[in-house]
Every structure is written in structure tokens, then in C-alpha cells.
Amino acid sequence: MTETLLNRRKAAIPAGAATSHPFFVDRAEGSELWDTDGKHYVDFVAGIAVMNVGHRHPRVMAAIAAQMDRYAHVAWPVQHYEPYVAVCERLNAVAPINDAVSFLVNTGAEATENAVKIARLATGRSGIIAFTGSFHGRTNLALSLTGKVAPLRASYPHFQPGIFHIPFPIPDHGTSEEESLRALDHLFRASISPDQVAAILVEPVQGEGGYYMAPPAFLQKIQQICSDHGILFIADEIQSGFGRTGKFFAIEHSGVEPDLIPVAKGIGGGLPLAGVIGKRSVMDKVMPGSLGGTFAGNPLACAASLAVFDIIRDEGLLDRATAIGQHLTTALARITARTDVPPIGAVRGLGAMVAFEVFKTEDHSVPDSDTTKTIATRAAAEGLLVLPCGYWGNTIRIAPPLTTTDKLLDEGLNRLTRALTGLYSNTIRKENHA
């Protein structure tokens, strides 16, 4: 079955639309998948941090079915419908923004582009500052904002003007908070003055960049710089939002109040939905009719989203995200001490955004992207889904659904351990540990 489907895929789909694992999903439930050949997988990817409440949660499925019985699509630019309003009300209620308002779009890239558009219109400025290692989407503006070349920006000829990048503070990679702030000061002195900058865009926890957390004190300093110069603070919560870090939004760990928050992924329970939350004083500077789209805030996706809000609240998934993170990081710390696995370390996590890095050397000085890819492939062969990421391509990220049981977490960790063992010479590691 898989071979036949792969041949059909090759004939119908361009190589650019790549897929990490060469199998086809037949069904999914909770934190588990089965492929078309009947193989079972523990899901530590969750559709790239989308399925926070698990695959096919009964309350999500019931909400979609109930909405389908009424209507599947009406366009918000033409007429109102209550589910759209209800989702925005819920977003405004949980956002760490005073007097928040929201609107809905379809994808994370679209949310990011709209946040930048709003910032430019509200300030009358064009400059946008983002960070190295960031990922903000694959559309033209979002790609220009993204701070990592391969594979997304490789050979791409043109980028939008007015966008600048400064180093994201990662001490393990040689960039301290102070050095990142000095780079921002240098940018203001050499390339663009603060009064030309519309917004600073930051992921409180980088997604594709490697699940690195921006230190709270650093975010607070960035917010103060924004306040001093009339620059808007945009917190990209597309991957880190909707309970993933143990709070509804990762920016809440810092105490910073953003001006704008793009959201997506976990908001729709598996259906395409995204949005932008922002201060009313900022959002209302945009002309009526300039925001939205034909499918933006689709009624079925809105119904699913309302169920997601309820599930996160009723099943205590914020606390569960914290517990999952502690469970995973504790187990990974034990695995790093083994002598029959590659040199791995830099175990980190904020809630259920957990990662570790793979190295070529025992002193963890040389990233190993090739072995990282091999680990993901071997894990899939063991029946576990994980994804590589990171600025150096040497990070394995773990983002299971927040409904994952401890039993399934342990099963996934067992499969990961089997994937790791045998990749590095036991003798060499034992000698180096001696």
C-alpha cells in the first residue's frame, strides 16, 4: 500500500512539497497514529504542535458535526456569524493584553503578515526587526522575516526591504543577552534609526529554531526599548500558544504585555484557523475592510476552536503541559548519561515544548545534523514520531499532545531510546567517560 501511494505522490506532487517520513496515515486517535500498512506510532509531533488536545478529541468532533448541520461556510466579509465572534471573545479573554480585540485568518504565515501590516499602518513606519533562528512562515513577507536560510530561503532571489535580524540570545551558541542587545543598539546606530522601526517581532520560544526560550529579563528589556521608541512589540505565539508551555501563551512567563500576538496551530483543533490579537488602540488604526479574507474564520474551524478552549480549561491542560515537560526532561536527562547513545545534551523545555541536541563530540562543541536526521528516521522505524529542527539542524524537538498519558509518554521514550542506541561506539563513549 505505501509503495503504491508513494509512486502516486511522486507523480502528482512537486519535490518542494517535502514530507519528513515516507508513510501515509490511515487513522489517528489521541496521541497515536496508524499508517496504511497497519504500523502503530506514538505521536511526539502533534501535527507540529497543532493537536494540543489530541487527534479527534470527541468534543472537537462533536462541535464540528453540530456546526456542519447548520452551515459550513459563509464569508465574514459579507455577513456576520456568531462562532467567529465567540472565538474572538475567548481569545481576548485569555490574551495578556489589556483591552484586546481580535480577528481571524487561515494560517500562521497569514497571521504574521497581518500583524506586520497592522504595525506598519498603526505607526506609519516600515522597519521590522526579527531574530536569527526564527521561523515565521513560507509566504514572501513571512519568509523575509524568517531568520534561517536552509532550506526555506536557500536560492530565493529577493526579500522585502525594511527587515533586519539580530542574534537570538543562546549562550550555548555563543550569544548572550547582552550581546544580542548590543547588536540591536548597533543596528539602531548603523542601519535603521528607532523612529523608523514599526515593530520588533520575537518568538517567546523559538519553534523551528530549536525550542530555545527567550529569557524573561531579555523580553522585558526589549519591551522597554519598544516603549521608549514607540515601537510595537509582536509576540509570535503560533507554535508556543494554546497551553503548549504551561500557560496559555508563552509570553506570560515573562510578564510582558505585547501589542500584537499572531496565533495559529493549536487554535483550531486540527482545522485551519489563525488570528491576530492586539491592543484596541493599535488595531483600530487600520481602515475597515483591510483585514480578513474569504475563508478567514471558517465556521467549522471556529466551532472546533471553541471546543479546544473548553477542553484546555475542563481537562486542566495547562498543568498537564507542565507535568509532561517535567516527565520528558527528567527522562531525557537520564538518557544523556548513557554510554550507548550519541553525544546528546542541552536538554531543555518550557512546558510541553521539549528538545535536546545531538553532537559529534563529547564536549558538545560540534553539532551533528546528519545523526539528528538518522535519529528521527530510526525513531519512526521504532514507531515514534519526532522532528529535527534548530539553527544547526541538530535538535530533536518533542511536542506531544497535551492529553498524552504517562503510559504513552514512557512508551515513546522507550522507542526513542531504542532509536538512539547503537548509533555511537560503546567503546569510544566508555573510554571518553572514563
Image: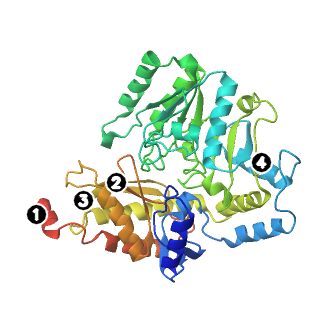
Residue on which disc 4 sits: 89
Nearer the observer, 153 or 77:
153
Residue on which disc 3 sits: 343
Mark pair 1, 2: CA separation: 24 Å
Task: Say which element carries label 2.
Answer: loop
Q: Amino acid at mark 2?
A: Asn
Residue on which disc 1 sits: 431
For residue 259, say whether it is visible: no
Mark pair 3, 2: CA separation: 11 Å
Q: Amino acid at mark 4?
A: Glu
Residue on which disc 2 sits: 394
Rate crowding at label 2 as few (under 14), some (14 to 19) or many (20 or more) other CA atoms within 10 Å.
many
CB atoms at circles 4 and 2 under 8 Å apart?
no
For residue 50, say whether it is visible: yes
Q: Please state the horizontal and vertical placement of residue 50, each as a whole percent of the image.
A: 59, 59
Nearest to N terminus: mark 1 or mark 2: 2
Q: Amino acid at mark 1?
A: Glu
Q: Residue at x 26, y 55 (%)?
A: 359
